Image (cartoon, rainbow, N blue to C red):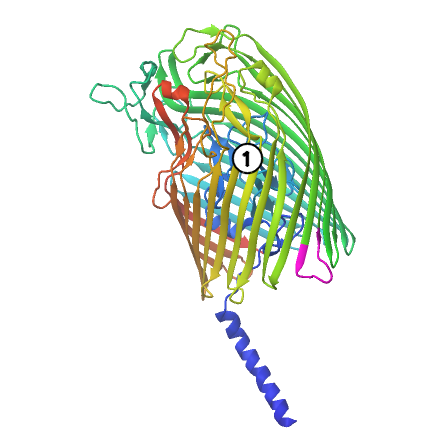
Amino acid sequence: MLHTTRTRLGMACGALLVMPLTAWSIPVLEEVIVTAEKRAESIQDVPISIAAFDENTLEKMGVYDIKGLASKVPNVVVNEFTGASTTVRLFIRGVGQNDVQVTQDPSVALYMDGVYIGSSVGTAFETADINRVEVLRGPQGTLYGRNATGGAINLVTNRAEPGLLNFRQRLTAGNYDTLRSRSILNLPLTDSTALKLAYAYSERDGITDNDGAGEDWGIEDRDNVTADFHWDVNGDATLDYKFEHSNIKDTSRLSQILRFDPDAPASAVISFANPALDARGMPVDVSQDRLDDATSFDQEVKGDVEIQAHTLDLAWELSDTLQLRSITGYRDVNAFNQTAQAPTVSLFGAYSIVNGISDTTFNQFSQELQLLGDSDHLTWVAGLYYYEDDSEEDNSAGNSNGSEAVPPGGIIDYTSTENTSIALFGQATWTPRKLEDWHFTLGARYSDDNRKASRNNTRVSYGFAGAPTTVPAFVADYDQDFDEFNPSFTVEYDLNALSNVYAKVVTAYKAGGTSQRSSSLDNFRNGFDPEDLVSYELGFKGDFLDSRARLNAAVFYMEFEGYQQSVQTGRNPGERDFINIDDADISGIELDFSLAITESLVGTLSYGYLDTKFGPGSITYQQIDDSSPTGLSLVEEQLTDELALAPQHSFTAALDYSYPLSFGALNANVNYQYQDESLGGVQLPAGELSDRNLVNATLSLTQLQLGDKLGTLRVTLWGNNLLDDEYHVGNIRQAAFDDLGLLALATFGDPRTYGVTLEYAFE
């Protein structure tokens, strides 16, 4: 007995000695929690291809707004709408909105704290206190609704916390006179209530100097204020209210001509501000490189986008297994934007090739009710969703393509919209008692949408080389109803406690609409049909090597019916309609791998592959031909073989190093992003975006103690695009531009940026 007792005591003491060593020497990857299916879950338990980033990771990657996610996630493209710095286009798995209009919705759903953001205008806002970003790749038609055929992006902010007095101040300085400030104060009001105040300010000089009139190109000037109130009403209910106000006064990036054909039919009407000349004295390639300066013939001005938003989130624990949640959202956007690009001069006067001035107002209201249940063998959510928005956009002060001038009495280009949507949705996961390794998920959503639009457009049209002609008054209305039922089915099987496989079939839909740029009354009144999608996906999620390694993988195939794309249907590139393209197919792969190499070193690799194509044969559409006596003749146009903004290969890699010091900790991060070249549009001729190779790095000293109860300090050196890669974030090429000899109109991404960040934290 004594021997046995001593043996057990020795084993226990040995275990106590070994445990700290084991815990230190065998690193474990952290669990990642997401709310992709309306409840908090481990990312490994959700049968969706997800990329999630917490606030520390976002800082390491240099992400301050939604545009910062560009090239950070394979099979995801984020870029500015050409010439509009505050308007963001989102593409996931090749699915997105190629032309931003108030009469058409995005194909990737953007959410802030559970509230859908209905307009792409003004989405380049910054938020002071982001908790995490979740990127859901693939259609999310059941839980996220009609405008998630590509996927969804969730922005989640930190809530106010009762019982915690916390203050953080972050200051950043960098080249291009970059200055950023983040101030966050969490105030406990009572044992059950708290108020969090946050302020973010960001400014940066332009990345391209303007030697002409007005501001430089690529200026950033933003501020954001939020106030969060949290109340633990009782042990079973919580209330969160958030108010947010943002102001963005950026200027557009320069879109520059890369190639010029002096022998083009109408090239004689074009000259350049700073031309390069060939042996004949004719302008040729202006520059293949990103310009450091250019001359504007137009008065370059800052935009002015003001956003106010309110969110009310109520949650009741009705029982141990039942929760009721209400999310109410209101958002008001007032935006002035100038889209001035490619400084040129024509026989008609001094113009940029595109110079548009727009005033946009957009208001939305949404209400979502969720009932969530959880038992041993059944987990489910049911919901009711209501959404409405209205907008007005006035482009009367703008001109486009050097082809429009203000007629006597003034130009009229005004569009208004009014939309409503109601949806019922539900999803349930059943785990049979005798088959506890199997999980069966069935989901469904019914959507009913009404879309209305009115347009008044009267102008003088010059064409590119013709006499001015007055276009008849264009006054038209659009009013259509749409409804759709979208089911989904998923089967999961647990291979063991740390890995699983899943197979799923998901459907999604995007409502029809009309085009505010249409030059045809009939096209505007008739609009375009809904976009429907069926997606098939196989996935694997697993942890290995005692949770030191993690591999998530997905392979998918998607079929479209009525894929919505914007194409030129008038004589000018700005005269466009949305068309429906059948037989658009997308297939691909996504791989995400993480490895805790040592206690101090963690590596991540992610890869995405896309194969996109339209159906067999020539795809044609009706094009308005202004040269025809009726203006309604049919013209055949061949579309591209591939979808736009769908790079075939994309890849990211990162190394994170941390080392404890006697006075704090040393942290370093190096990350690399590659994105393949892609097409800028689906209409021939199409511009081509170059590939990108971006190297970023940060080096930090953290947890620097300033004294007893005086807080901590963090110092970070950072650099983005360290190799100064010159890559495109937009590239337009159209037949009308070719006639002028303008063979490529490209917008470049940010050059090399670097700086230092100081952060003070008090708790």
- Magenta stretch bounds: 429-439
Of residues 688 and 280, the one nearer the viewer is 688
What residue sits right under mark 1 in the picture? Answer: 123
Is residue 125 visible in the rendered image? The answer is: yes
Of residues 293 and 33, the one nearer the viewer is 33
Q: Quadrant of the N terminus?
A: bottom right
311 left or right, relative to 324: left
- In percent of width and height, residue 408 lies at 50, 5
Q: Amino acid at mark 1?
A: Thr
Does residue 294 lie above or below 601 as drawn? above
Does residue 8 lie above or below 475 as drawn? below
Name the outermost residue toward the left.
Answer: 279
Of residues 646 and 557, the one nearer the viewer is 557
Crowding near the residue tagged with mark 1, few <14, some 14–19, many ≥20 C-alpha atoms within 10 Å:
many
- In percent of width and height, residue 519 lies at 53, 15
Residue at 44% across / 31% down in the picture? 680
